[in-house]
């Protein structure tokens, strides 16, 4: 997250005023100026002042304080971050936005190895115990958490109970964003969390290389826009061992393939010599560099590909590493965790000149992920909305996807292609596992019956394969929601429920809730939850 302020306060670093001190000053400041200054927010935070407490004084400050938690369950490690978010209201109309203006980290949990019962099953009991212990150490009760994000990433996504885990943890308090992140979404999250996206806004092309336990994710970003993502099965824990005995206790399918290709035959309970460990690490970097160069001709690399070869061939101004191995690459970590973290990082450092651009240090490495979701951007869509079945509301936790229309769309097929491409960027084309989607449609064409029919037809064509029985949730940048919703539901007789709202501000990596109709049913509240990064 890029904060409006240039410095941060951790939970232990906040100066605590005496009872009542600075509290009244903050209230008086708002009464005089209509908003809170930074020192006012700090003073109120020190007093743990709540919105309800201020409201009892008859004041509507136009701001709120939320406690947020980000839970990251990865293939190798898991961790939590508790934060306090300060949101300020933008505008005083019925349709208003609360924007995060400050974020203070209250507690970062230790990094814990993700526990498995077997190759296919994550140990839910141990993870639950770790989360409960983190709440206790942070001094936070689940009832005090207002919002957050639970993201399951890497090889953990492929485990049998990944979706059940994210839902289980979300019930520990607050209104959460819950997502099992496929490789492309995980790559995008890492690029935001490491600071690569923010750095690229200085007219740079940045390649974020997120090296984790089971996979490496690549994101190419320029001027804040994601150009390409990709992923390959190269990671530090494809083979892992007990640090005390050196005996192998984890062999992933990809790890066995890579090892056997260089004459190593790993077995559970067996050991690897130092020479074999270095040979394996060199082979990992060989595969990674070949992937970055777009070389997918060898059968082994083809077998390791997750998303297909990279096609970007432009200049790279900076390469930033994130993920657990990034901690070793930047010499922030040196411990032996019974895996190839140290070996892989050392080999990358040795061959750093072979990477596509000069290496820069990012903001975060292993913690380059979400720390929660800021809520609320509360907006109201009215007058021109379309609700085919109001009883379907409320709907929660729909992931925003924003197709990129060029303005040259000539038929339903080109509209559908733009939508499909946008969904592919976030691994949302698998009907069995795809997160519920809310399409944000910034339609560049004039509002004519022919153009709106083309848009409606393209939406239906794109969503039909993945929205079997699911409601169609559509968000428009201008007041065409009622028209397009009616075309889809009434003219095209689509069986799915249709919710179409308009003039709501959202962006990719947002998640939305659509509330029950207000008053005369001509308006609905839309809560937008934006992922917050370090």
Image (cartoon, grey):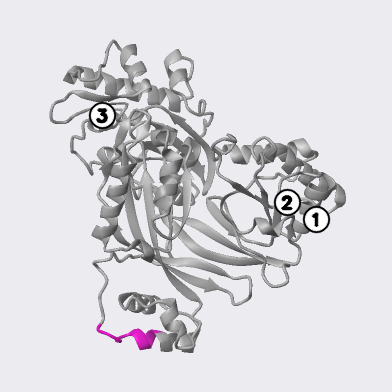
Q: Secondary structure at mark 3?
A: loop
Q: Earlier in the sequence, mark 3 or mark 2?
A: 3
Count of numbered badges drawn on the protein: 3
**Which of the 4 image quadrants contains residue 154?**
top left
Q: Earlier in the sequence, mark 1 or mark 3?
A: 3
Answer whether residue 24 is magenta in the image: yes
Q: Are marks 3 and 2 in contact (CB under 8 Å)?
A: no
Residue labelled with disc 1: 483
Tell me, for residue 340, which label it has, or none. 3
Quadrant in which the N terminus appears? bottom left
Q: Secondary structure at mark 1?
A: helix
Q: Which residues are magenta?
A: 18-26
- Viewer-closest of 3 and 529: 529
Residue 319 image offset from top left, x and y in percent? 39, 39
Rendered residue at 78%/39% (across/down):
412
Residue labelled with disc 2: 443
Task: Check the image and report above or below for 78 versus 87.
Answer: above
- Viewer-closest of 465 and 297: 465
Quadrant in which the C terminus appears? bottom left
Residue 194 image offset from top left, x and y in percent? 39, 47
């Amino acid at each position: 997250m890029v904060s409006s302020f240039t410095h941060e306060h951790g939970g232990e670093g906040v100066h605590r005023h005496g009872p009542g001190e600075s509290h009244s000053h903050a209230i008086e400041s708002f009464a005089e100026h209509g908003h809170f200054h930074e020192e006012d927010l700090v003073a109120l935070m020190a007093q743990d002042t709540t919105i309800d407490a201020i409201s009892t004084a008859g004041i509507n400050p136009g701001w709120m304080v939320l406690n947020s938690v980000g839970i990251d369950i990865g293939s190798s490690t898991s961790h939590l971050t508790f934060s306090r978010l300060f949101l300020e209201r933008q505008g005083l109309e019925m349709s208003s936005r609360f924007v995060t203006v400050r974020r203070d980290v209250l507690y970062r949990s230790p990094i814990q190895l993700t526990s498995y019962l077997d190759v296919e099953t994550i140990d839910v009991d141990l993870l639950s115990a770790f989360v409960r212990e983190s709440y206790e150490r942070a001094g936070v009760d689940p009832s005090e958490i207002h919002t957050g994000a639970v993201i399951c990433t890497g090889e953990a996504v492929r485990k049998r109970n990944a979706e059940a885990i994210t839902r289980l943890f979300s019930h520990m308090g607050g209104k959460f964003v819950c997502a099992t992140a496929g490789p492309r979404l995980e790559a995008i999250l890492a690029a935001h969390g490491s600071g690569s996206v923010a750095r690229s806004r200085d007219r740079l092309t940045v390649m974020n290389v997120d090296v984790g336990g089971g996979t490496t994710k690549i994101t190419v970003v320029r001027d804040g826009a994601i150009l390409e993502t990709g992923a390959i099965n190269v990671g530090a824990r494809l083979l892992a061992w007990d640090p005390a005995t050196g005996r192998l206790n984890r062999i992933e399918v990809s790890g066995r393939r890579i090892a056997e290709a260089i004459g190593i035959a790993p077995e559970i309970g067996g050991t690897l010599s130092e020479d074999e460990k270095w040979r394996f690490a060199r082979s990992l970097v060989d595969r990674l560099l070949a992937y970055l160069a777009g070389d997918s001709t060898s059968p082994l690399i083809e077998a390791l590909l997750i998303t297909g070869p990279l096609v970007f061939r432009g200049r790279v101004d900076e390469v930033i590493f994130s993920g657990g191995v990034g901690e070793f690459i930047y010499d922030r970590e040196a411990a032996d965790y019974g895996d190839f973290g140290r070996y892989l990082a050392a080999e990358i450092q040795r061959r750093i000149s072979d990477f596509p651009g000069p290496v820069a240090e990012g903001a975060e490495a292993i913690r380059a992920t979400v720390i929660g979701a800021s809520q609320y951007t509360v907006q109201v869509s009215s007058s021109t909305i379309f609700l085919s079945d109001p009883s379907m509301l409320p709907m929660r936790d729909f992931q925003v996807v924003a197709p990129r229309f060029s303005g040259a769309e000539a038929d339903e097929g080109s509209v559908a292609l733009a939508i499909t491409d946008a969904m592919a960027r976030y691994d949302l084309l698998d009907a069995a596992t795809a997160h519920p989607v809310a399409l944000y449609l910034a339609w560049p064409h004039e509002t004519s019956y022919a153009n709106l029919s083309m848009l409606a037809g393209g939406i239906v064509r794109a969503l039909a394969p993945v929205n079997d029985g699911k409601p169609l949730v559509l968000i428009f940048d201008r007041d065409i929601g009622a028209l397009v919703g009616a075309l889809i539901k009434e003219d095209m007789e689509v069986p799915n429920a249709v919710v179409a709202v308009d003039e709501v501000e959202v962006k990719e990596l947002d998640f939305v809730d659509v509330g029950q109709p207000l008053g005369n049913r001509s308006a609905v509240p839309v809560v937008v939850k934006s992922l917050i990064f370090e």
